[in-house]
Image (tube, grey):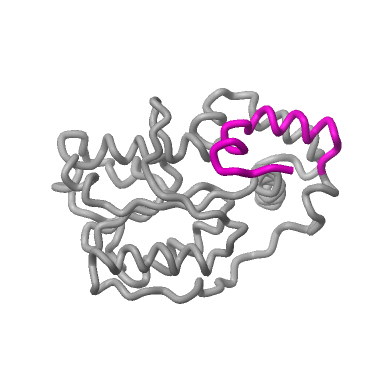
Amino acid sequence: MLFSPTYNYLFIHCQKTGGKSIREQFWEIEPQGNLASKMHFGAHTNDDMQQRLHAHGNASYFKAMLHPKIWDGLYRFTVVRNPFDRIISWYWFNRHYRQIPREMSFDTYLHCRIEKEHYIEENLLQYWKIHDHTGTAMCEFFKFEDGLDNAVKQASTKINAQCPAFPIQEQLVRRDHTNIRLDRRHYREVFTPDQRKYWEEVCRLDFETFGYEW
């Protein structure tokens, strides 16, 4: 995430959606952006606040941490991605950094991802990154497939509307991040029919909420 008390915005980072590049670009505009003083976080603050305000926390968590007046005044946004393409990207990421055995198949990986329930609500489903327990959306979302240039321009324009000192970003600055996805095939060429059916059920909330389909 990136929280800016100066420009009144909160970026919720869903993993494997290009969020690292967005964080880096917006961070350079305000180097102290997510090192907000404790006064912004109300009664829930303690000495390990910054450790617990981790990069991939969900919107509900940040709402609980922030003072209500601060939360209500924030422009909040995120980027989401097609669940088929996103899990392939995650597979190659975990494989590259040896978070899973290099020999693990994609099929095995799909099933391993949901062995622990917390993966469903906190990591796997983008739905739970930006919705509370009542199903209320807590931030605006942009689609990865519409382009990250589009996401940063629209988000920065809305931040600028409330804080004119924040410069509008015309495009995303491309970063020299390691290209770790060795298989560049379209997801339709990667998923088998059984895998497709399985993943559509696992990520049903994401498909329905964000309008994704095969």
Q: Is residue 207 magenta?
A: yes
Q: Nearer the viewer, residue 16 or 200?
A: 200
Task: Report if residue 199 lies within the magenta region.
Answer: yes
Q: Position of residue 195 (x, y in %)?
A: 80, 33
**Horizontal arrangement in the rendering, residue 68 relative to residue 161 (left or right):** left
Q: Between 157 and 12, which is closer to the camera in this rendering?
A: 157
x 39%, y 54%: residue: 11
Q: Residue drawn 71% across and 33% down?
A: 199
- Up the image or down, 76 lies above or below 107; here it is below
Res 29 → quadrant = bottom left
Locate the C terminus and report the quarter of the image it occupies.
Answer: top right
Residue 47 location, x and y as percent? 22, 41
Nearest to the observer: residue 1 or residue 152:
152
Q: For this rendering, which residue is in front, 52 or 60?
A: 60
What residue appears at the point 53 percent right and 40 percent down from the top-left corner? 126
Q: Position of residue 109 (x, y in %)?
A: 73, 35
175 in relation to 91, above or below: below
Which image quadrant is residue 196 in?
top right
Name the residue: 24% across, 72% down.
Answer: 164
Where does the image place residue 185, in percent across and percent down from the top left? 82, 56
**Residue 110 occupies which quadrant of the picture?**
top right
Q: Is residue 185 left or right of residue 181?
A: right
Is residue 141 at all visible to an observer of this figure? yes
- Give the magenta-colored segment's residue range: 191-214
161 to the left or right of 111: left
* Prevalent SS, magenta region: helix
Please count the marks in the image: 0
